[in-house]
Amino acid sequence: MSKQKKHIVQSPRDLISNKYLFLSISLSVVATGIVLYLTYTPEGFEHVRLKRMPGLVIASVVMFLKIWFTAAKIRYLAEKRISWAGSFRIVLSWDFASAITPSTIGGAPLGIYAMTREHIPLGQASAITFYTILLDQIFYLMVIPILIIAGLYLEIIPEAFGVFGKSAMAFVYLSLLGYGFVLAYGVLINPFYLKRMVQALFRLPVLRKHADTIERELDNLVGTSETLRRKPFSFLAKAYGLAALAWMARASLPAIVVLSFLPADEVLLFFRSFAMSLATLFMPTPGGSGGVEALFVIFLGPLFDREIFIGIATFMWRFITFYTIIGIGIMVLSWYLNNSVVKSFRDSTEKSDESKTPDAAPLNSNPQKQGEEF
């Protein structure tokens, strides 16, 4: 077990940076505030229709379904060794970490920690995390060709993106497709090929210092791959179904929020929501804050008839998918930390009692002898 993984099991404190938390929330608040300011008009609220507001309730329900599908997937991959409550805690911890860390870090380390707190062995927790990433990549492999074909008939990438923006989206598509093919081939078909490729990459001077660490992890990867390949196809199919449903719920949320304010071209709206969701994976800021708000305006803003709704919809989307997760995630992490403190106190108390017992036993074993000595 690597030192990093041992640390993950011991405490999540070093996995959550207060700097990232502050920066993520600050960037989101500033970006949303700018959008609200630029799109505000005094008479705009007169056009709000209460009959469309239940759409925000539907968006909240879809957000819950996204969490539920993800929890069901993790519980299924763990072969139901995790309770439903534990599965929800894992998902909320994972989503919380994803919301406040750069995409290069993600929520996987905290997800592994949460699984170990739910009594899943570290090796199995790592395998579940790895399988989860694989299922996401398979979803991208199936969705991206659909988006490319639909793009021949619909303006999925807005004109406001320009040539540079469209080139960036092409890079997003190709990167996800390439990574998905390599990961699927390496995990499901030939893990030794993936191992050799990563080894070659870490021979580069800038990465050479991490070669020993990655070598141990690659051995774990090969072992995990062998375990996954022995699973029947039905296992993969059901797990993929849950992953796909979670992703569809996540990607449809922006469209549902937009439809809560005004009618729009539903087909184009949902395709743009999917494309935008893929683009958010490449935002370098913690949780994508600042960037995802801009993407929302660029992708979905042109579909609004009234500008004021752009700012309100941006805020509501981030409130449902970001600020709520931050609040709940903090509570879940507090629960884990408090339980860790209680467990540590209980263990130290038990050890203290055990250390006293051998010394006390001879004194109490023969009271008559003790009396004679006194």
Image (tube, rainbow, N blue to C red):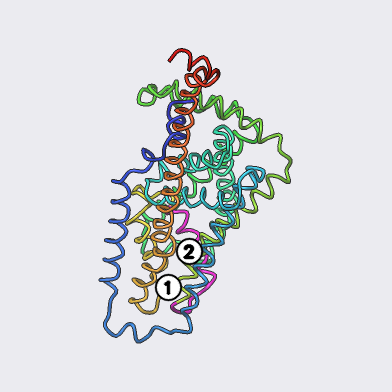
Residue tagged 1: 303
Residue numbers of the magenta segment: 261-280
Locate residue 106, reporting x and y percent: 43, 44
Q: Nearer the viewer, residue 332 or 44?
A: 332
Which of the 4 image quarters holds residue 221? top right
Q: Is residue 106 above or below residue 47?
A: above
Q: Residue at x 45, y 12 (%)?
A: 373
Q: Secondary structure at mark 2?
A: helix
Queried whether the magenta region covers residue 256, the answer comes back as no
Distance, label 2 to label 1, CA atoms, is 10 Å
Residue tagged 2: 272
Locate residue 47, reporting x and y percent: 37, 85
Q: Is residue 56 above or below residue 10?
A: below
Labels 2 and 1 touching (C-beta < 8 A): yes
Q: Nearer the viewer, residue 91 or 203?
A: 91
As drawn, the label of residue 113 is none
Figure quadrant of the C terminus: top left
Which of the 4 image quarters holds residue 193? top right
Q: Residue at x 48, y 21 (%)?
A: 360
Give the amino acid at mark 2: Arg
Give the amino acid at mark 1: Leu
Q: Is residue 121 left or right of residue 19?
A: right
Q: Secondary structure at mark 1?
A: helix
